[in-house]
Image (cartoon, rainbow, N blue to C red):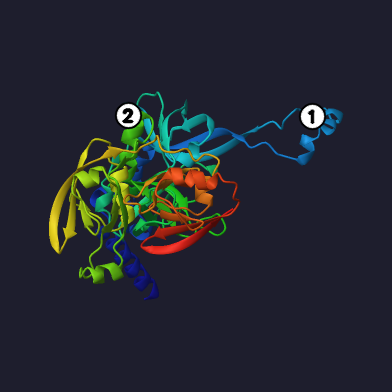
Amino acid sequence: MRKFRALAWACLAAMALIIVLPANARGQPVQGIAGAQLPTLAPLLEQVTPAVVNIAVVSEAPAATNPLYNDPFFRRFFALPQAPQARPRMSAGSGVIIDADKGHILTNHHVVADAREIIVTLKDGQRLGAELVGSDQATDIALLRVEAENLVAIEIGDSDRLKVGDYVLAIGNPFGLGQTVTSGIISALGRTGINPEGYEDFIQTDASINPGNSGGALVTLDGRLAGVNTAILSPAGGNVGIGFAVPSNMAVAVMTQLAEHGEVRRGRIGVGIQDLTPDLAEAFNLGGLRGAVIANVEPGSPAEQADLQVGDVVIAVDDRPVLSSTDLRNRIGLTPVGEKVTLRLLRDNETREITVTIAAENTASTSLAGTPFDGAVLRPAGGNAGVLVESVASGSPAARAGLQADDVIVAVNRTRVASPEDLRQLTGDGRRTLALEVIRGGSALLLVLR
């Protein structure tokens, strides 16, 4: 009787799984123990895995430094070179073929950063030299190109249609072992705070992701690319069930610009924004609405020309909902320069639609190299409201100082500032310690820079 019950439960579980999985993911049921029909993902993986590649990168490790190298007598006595020599360093990652005809492969920026040589290994073992087409640190996306025939590309899905609870597969090259498949679900969407200096909208999953999976594919059960695996949250460096992927829609937007320009030319409309917090929503009598509040409008900007106003609450861009200031920043920043977007917003409890033309970032801003603001894209917030931090490069002095995108610097050492030139002058007067008054998310804070 016990054996009969166990067999019955096994059959019921198998039937439940067969009902849950879509037909094209189940493939043909296989014969299991005692003749039971068991579901399998093998047919799906046979279709998808040829599009996922292993990537080996040769770069230069930083040369070891020692104060004795600065001593000419020490160098001469031991016949040492004038400076320590950099050593080759090997690292591994993953990638996804997204255009078989052009040989285009998506991967992570951090996988190929500072690469001297990039080798791509296909599933069949074929090794190919790869060319770096372009790379974007802010989204951690890079585009490679290889020359080969009979490549297999993955079909790209619409990441905006994903829902928490959807089944996904993570495919990559963990720890350099070779192609490996793990499974799980989408645990959360729209995650931020992983890389505050970049453009974030991460998919969170409990499918096992480990070092080496970076750049690999996160795939839905219909065989489409949902995201590019990029990071894990782990106290010990291994998988603990919290992994992150760049959504496919963001990755494709970056890829398109990398393929055309070799870089991402970010757009702007000239506004400072902040989250629509519960307190602001209550003050505006908006209930539980989510969106982004316009905190300031830059004079002469596309936003001013389109009649955007302080206090407007943006709730959608081109009919796609805006859930936060980060969401709006991503949508605007990744829209090609010159294109028009339609903002749906609330003003005086009325819904309006305003079309705005995306302008190019002004790269000819005041040089702040060698200052604590090095690595930040800064511009006047407008109306003498301070200096807006549009973006911060990861690992830069500005990032180490604690600055984040959308911060508004209003004063330095109690002196009001209105432009990047004001910051340059205040950091060039020999002061070693700077106290910054910053507005972040509608709240004021102090940052001390040394």
In the image, residue 341 sits, relative to residue 272, either above or below, namely: above
Q: As drawn, is 127 to the left or to the right of 162?
A: right
Q: Is residue 29 visible?
A: no
Front in this rendered view, residue 438 or 14? 438
Q: As drawn, is 302 to the left or to the right of 189?
A: left
Q: Secondary structure at mark 2?
A: helix
- Dot 1 or dot 2: first in sequence order is 1
In the image, residue 208 sits, relative to residue 16, either above or below, namely: above
Residue name at image x 33 percent, y 69 percent: 9
Task: Give the residue type at disc 1.
Answer: Leu
Mark number displayed over residue 191: none
In the image, residue 385 sits, relative to residue 49, either above or below, namely: below
Number of disc labels: 2
Front in this rendered view, residue 343 or 415? 415
Horizontal and vertical percent for residue 384? Answer: 35, 52
Kindly identify which residue carries mark 2.
Answer: 260
Q: Secondary structure at mark 1?
A: loop
Task: Give the residue type at disc 2.
Answer: Glu
Which picture quadrant has residue 351?
bottom left
Q: Is residue 324 visible?
A: yes
Q: As drawn, is 120 to the left or to the right of 316?
A: right
Kindly identify which residue carries mark 1.
Answer: 80
